[in-house]
Image (cartoon, helix red, strand yellow):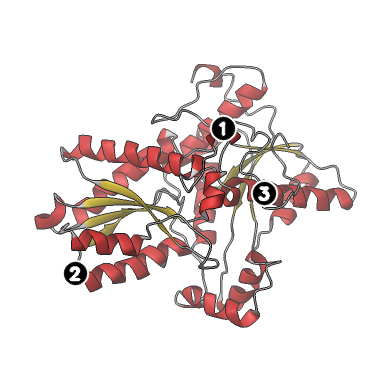
Amino acid sequence: MSDHTEAGTAAPYDALLLLSFGGPEGPDDVVPFLENVTRGRGIPRERLKEVGQHYFLFGGVSPINAQNRELLEALRKDFAGHGLDLPVYWGNRNWAPYLTDTLRELTEDGHRRVLVLATSAYASYSGCRQYRENLADSLAALEAEGRTVPRVDKLRHYFNHPGFVRPMADAVLTALAALPEDVRDGAHLAFTTHSIPTAAADTSGRPEAHTEDGAGGAYVAEHLDTARVIADAVREATGTDRPWKLVYQSRSGAPHIPWLEPDICDHLEELHASGVPAAVMVPIGFVSDHMEVKYDLDTEATAKAAELGLPVARAATVGAAPRFAAAVRELVLERAATERGLAPERCALGALGPSHDVCPVGCCPARSPRPAAAGAE
C-alpha cells in the first residue's frame, strides 16, 4: 500500500476502539443483559427469561466476549509485529466492558482522536447506525461529566476486504472436507446472515442504495457480492461450480412485520426436498462464532438437517484470524492516510468497491431521530 508507508503511522489517530455487542458471562447475567438489549421496548421479565433459554443451554455464557478478547490480543500482536504504535481498547454496547466506561478510560488516558472497529461488517441500522447512536450517547454522557471528549471516527465497512473474505473462503473448503466423500461434490452452499425487517434492509446504506418492496438495499447487495466472491474462490479451488443461495437466520420481533427470507431451516428443507445430497452453512454475516451462530446454526439448523437426513457442515467465521487482524491494520493505516490528505490504496474484492469512510446524511436512517457520532449527521 504505497501511501501507507509513511512510517506505518496511524496519525492523527492515537487509539483504536473495538466496539462490539457484548454478551452474558454467567447465568445471573442473562436476564440483565437481555434487559439492556431490549431497553425501551417494554418486554416483560418473564418473556426475557424465555428468550434467555438459548443462553442457558450454554451455561448462561455467550462466546462473544471470549472471542473479542482473542481478537483484541490478535490486533495488539499484529500491530506490535508491524511497528504500529496504537493502543487498542474494547467496549460493548450491552454488557461489560461497557462503551461509556471504555470511552471514559480512553479520555483519562489522554486520547483525543479515536478510530472505531465495529464487529459488524455490513451496512444496516442495527449493524452501523445503532453503533453510532450508542457512541453519541456515551460521548454525551462524558461531556455531561465535564470531560473533554475525543473525536471519534469509524472504520469503513469491511465486508469485501480480502482479509475478511479470504479466510471465509478457506473455511468453506475446510467444511466441505468434513462432509462424507460420497456427498461432497454435490453439496450446495447456504450463505447465512442475520435477518432484519425488510423496511430496515431497504433503507440500508447510502440513500442512492435504498430500494423498495423488500429488495434489501445495501445490506442484501453487500452480502450477495461477498457470497459470490467466496463461491467463485471455492470453484477455483475445487473445480466444482456449486449452487449457492443467501439465506437468513435469527429472526426476532412481531410475526406480522416482514423480515428477510428464506430462513436457513426452511432452506434446508427445500434442499432436501429437491434431492440435494448435502449443504455447507456459511455464516458470512457474522465476524465470530457468537450465540446466534452457536445456537441458530450449530444447534437448531443442525438438528433440522439431522431430522431431514441431510448431511451438513458449518464453515467457521473469521474470528481472530491473523489475516483479519492484518486487514484491520490496513484499514487503520488507510483511514489515517486519508485523514492526512493522502490517497491510499483501498482494498476490496467483488463488484461493489470499497465502502465510504463517513456515513452520509440519510445512511441507514434511524427509526426515530437520534444523534449519531462518526457520520455526516
Q: Residue at x 56, y 46 (%)?
A: 124
Kindly report which numbered mark, 2 or 3, lies closer to the viewer in this rendering: 3
| Mark 1 touches mark 2? (CB < 8 Å) | no
Q: Position of residue 128 (x, y in %)?
A: 60, 46
Q: Earlier in the sequence, mark 2 or mark 3?
A: 2
Question: Could you give the CA–CA distance between mark 1 and mark 3, rounded to whole angstroms?
Answer: 16 Å
Question: Could you give the CA–CA distance between mark 1 and mark 2, rounded to whole angstroms?
Answer: 44 Å
Q: Residue at x 70, y 52 (%)?
A: 134
**Residue holding disc 1:** 208
Residue lying furthest bottom: 46
| Mark 1 touches mark 3? (CB < 8 Å) | no
Residue lying furthest left: 182
**Residue holding disc 2:** 309
Secondary structure of residue under mark 3: loop
Badge 2: how crowded within 10 Å, few (<14), some, or many (20+)? few
145 relative to 112, above or below: below
Give the tally of numbered discs.
Answer: 3
Q: Amino acid at mark 2?
A: Gly
Q: Earlier in the sequence, mark 1 or mark 3?
A: 1
**Residue holding disc 3:** 366
374 relative to 370, above or below: above
Q: Quadrant of residue 33?
A: bottom right
Badge 1: how crowded within 10 Å, few (<14), some, or many (20+)? few
Q: Position of residue 248 (x, y in %)?
A: 41, 56
